[in-house]
Image (spheres, rainbow, N blue to C red):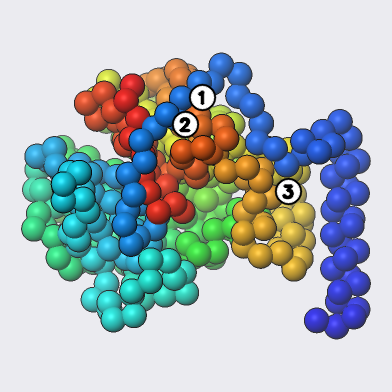
Amino acid sequence: MSARSLALTAAAAAALVSITVALYPTVNLSLFDPPTIPGSHDHLRRATVVPVTGAVGPESLVFDPNGEGPYTGVADGRILKWEGDDRGWTEFAVTSSQRKECLRPFAPEREHVCGRPLGLRFDKKTGELYIADAYLGLHVVGPAGGLSTPVVTEVEDQPLRFTNDMDIDEHEDVIYFTDTSTNFQRRQFISSVLTKDSTGKLLKYDKETKRVSVMLRGLAFANGVALSKDRSFVLVAETTSCRVLRYWLRGPNAGKFDVFAELPGFPDNIRRNSEGEFWVALHSKKGNFAKFALSSSWIGKTLLKLPLSFKQLHSLLVGGKPHATAVKLSEEGKVLDVLEDSEGKTLRFISEVEEKDGKLWIGSVLMPFMGTYHL
């Protein structure tokens, strides 16, 4: 980097700090701290950690129609199955046949080759596992596992760039899924957030006709998906905007959408429990610096030009302190409960909360373990 470039970079960094102090004069050293959530319960620190040996990032968790599992996708492209404390994790499926160089637990530069399974859902009627692979599109594998088969790899003659999550309506034989961005891939998710990229989509795949239709466009980091218990609406997490949108499928508002919930942080996956309520995993809470950084795409783009590493940028956005936050919403979008590990003593950067038989199974897109917590 030339001396002039270094000077400009330093000036930009100084300007950002000056603007931050001017806009937030009262926060001082607490500027980067994750905010507190009134009424939350700091219980997730009592969770039990389940290591994912030799792997990283158990992002989504799902049980098969027989109640076995959970199954999870990890950063090296595999889908693993939990066989209990005695046997641990076994390999169930992969989304890419190019496995020779997929030996490291975490290698972002190889994700487009090895695949990166994110959202997982079983079709309860067929026993097939559907996989939202960030790079390879929507895939499916049979009940015996193995190499998955592509289902949807492009939409409107454009390749899927960042397939993220899904839910299945077995009654209608359709799959609702998200494409996070047409500009950025998964390993560029910080850039997608900081530039306030709004090219995400909520999509519907008809299994009978094999046609894909776009339900919502212009989403700021389209992420988790969950169908309501009565199938009258589908939820989609808009991560950058820290909110959950509701798209009506039936009733007088069919075809319209509204804001289901505003959240205190960046939502990842959404999962419905047996009561029809929804657990939303927050990647992190949204602190003052994140609010400032996202107040203008110019600020975010300027941050990306600074000589900061991925870890440094991520740390700024999440507030420096690793933590875990899960929000429980009613069928109407009201907050019922907030569970936290506010100091990140046990869990951090959670990506999904799956409730089963009085226990929460908790995934993380970044950690080498998942967690369980008894309600």
For residue 265, which quarter of the picture? top right
- Residue 74 position, x and y percent, is 34, 58
The residue lying toward the viewer, choosing from 175 and 133, is: 133
CA gap, disc 2 and disc 3: 29 Å
All told, the count of numbered labels is 3
Q: Residue farthest to the front?
A: 86
Mark 1 nearby-residue class (10 Å; few <14, some 14–19, many ≥20): some
Above or below, 26 against 41 in this view is below
Q: Which residue is mark 2?
A: 45
- State the residue at coordinates (31%, 57%): 53
- Residue 212 position, x and y percent, is 30, 56
Say the numbered circle drawn on residue 272.
none
CA gap, disc 3 and disc 1: 27 Å
Above or below, 38 against 314 in this view is above
- State the residue at coordinates (46%, 25%): 43
Is residue 355 shown left or right of residue 258?
left
Marks 2 and 1: CB-CB under 8 Å?
yes
Q: Quadrant of the N terminus?
A: bottom right
CA gap, disc 2 and disc 1: 7 Å
Say what amino acid the circle numbered 3 marks. Answer: Ala
Say what amino acid the circle numbered 1 marks. Answer: Asp
Q: Which residue is mark 3?
A: 293
Mark 2 nearby-residue class (10 Å; few <14, some 14–19, many ≥20): many
- Residue 312 position, x and y percent, is 67, 58
- State the residue at coordinates (16%, 51%): 87
Q: Which residue is mark 1?
A: 42
Say what amino acid the circle numbered 2 marks. Answer: Arg
Q: Is residue 267 visible?
A: no
Q: Is residue 4 visible?
A: yes
